[in-house]
Amino acid sequence: MADSAFFHPAGTLAADGFEYEVFDPTPSTASVWADTMQHGAPPAAIMVRAMEKLVGEGARISRVTIDLLGVVPITRTRVRAWVARPGRTISLLTAEMDCVDGAGEYRTVARAQAWALAASDTSAIARDLSPVLPPAGASQGVMPGFFQHLKDQGFLAACDWRFVDGPDGPDGVKQCWIRAKMPLVAGEEPSPLVQVFSVVDAANGISAYLDPTAVTWMNMDMTVHFHRSPQPVDGWVGLLGDQLVGDEGIGTTVSRLYDGAGAFAVGAQTLLVAAR
């Protein structure tokens, strides 16, 4: 039976002097690398969901950084968020995600931080020279070949995908529209920001030019800088991505994020690149 959400709520927990929300992740959170570990998007989104609740009136999130501290297992999860630096104009929000490990103990697997800034009207000086991303069509493009054998599993099966060939063809900068088929948390309507982070980690996959049978390229973070608030139409988020890989086993995925009105953010992910 298909999952109804990436996470099911499992109450709250008071521990170590903190209050946590508790969740059970579903198989739809599974990574393409192993079906026992979570894809980076659901953990990112569940922490963003917690931080967004702390954003003050009239403020907007301008930057989010997610650090994945290791493998995120598909086990019971607890999340907490707090204001690390309060302020009327600028505030810093922090979140932490713990999962139950093999010994039955909670272990911190991911952390997040977000800057929330006071909003003001800058429409008269707004500027964005991002490339245009063609809109998602009913049958645009096909999933890259190395995804094909995984498309019916885990996170890939939990999303709708529309790939678009760019001006440099299929071997150039990758273009894709993606949306989650299910809410992040069962019984909740995801906010626009949560919709974005439910899929944004996929930039590392859609932009890949490497052969996954010969090379692994795992990201341990993601950073997204917003220049306006996102408003996905029917949940669709556009990704325009490329990979920069050097000769020392490290690299970067760079991306632009789109909604129906155009680009709203830029992203980056650190890559560990290694031969199998």
Image: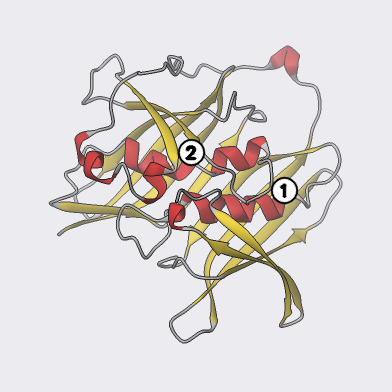
Give residue 112's quadrant in the image. bottom right
Q: How many marks?
A: 2
Q: Position of residue 30 (x, y in %)?
A: 40, 56
What percent of the width, then of the height, locates residue 39?
Answer: 42, 54
Residue hosting label 2? 267
- Asked if residue 14 lies left or right of residue 142, the reply is right
Residue 37 sits above or below residue 201 on the image: below
Q: CA distance from mark 2 to mark 1?
A: 19 Å
Q: Determine the residue positioned at 44% across, 19% down.
A: 136
Of the pair 183 and 170, the residue shown nearer to us: 183
- Residue 68 pos. (x, y %): 47, 61
What coloring was used for the rendering? secondary structure
Q: Nearer the viewer, mark 2 or mark 1?
A: 1
Q: Please state which amino acid type lies under the numbered disc 1.
A: Glu
Picture layout, residue 55 above or below residue 80 = above
> Please, what secondary structure does the residue beneath circle 1 have?
helix
Q: Residue 78 or 127: which is nearer the viewer?
A: 78
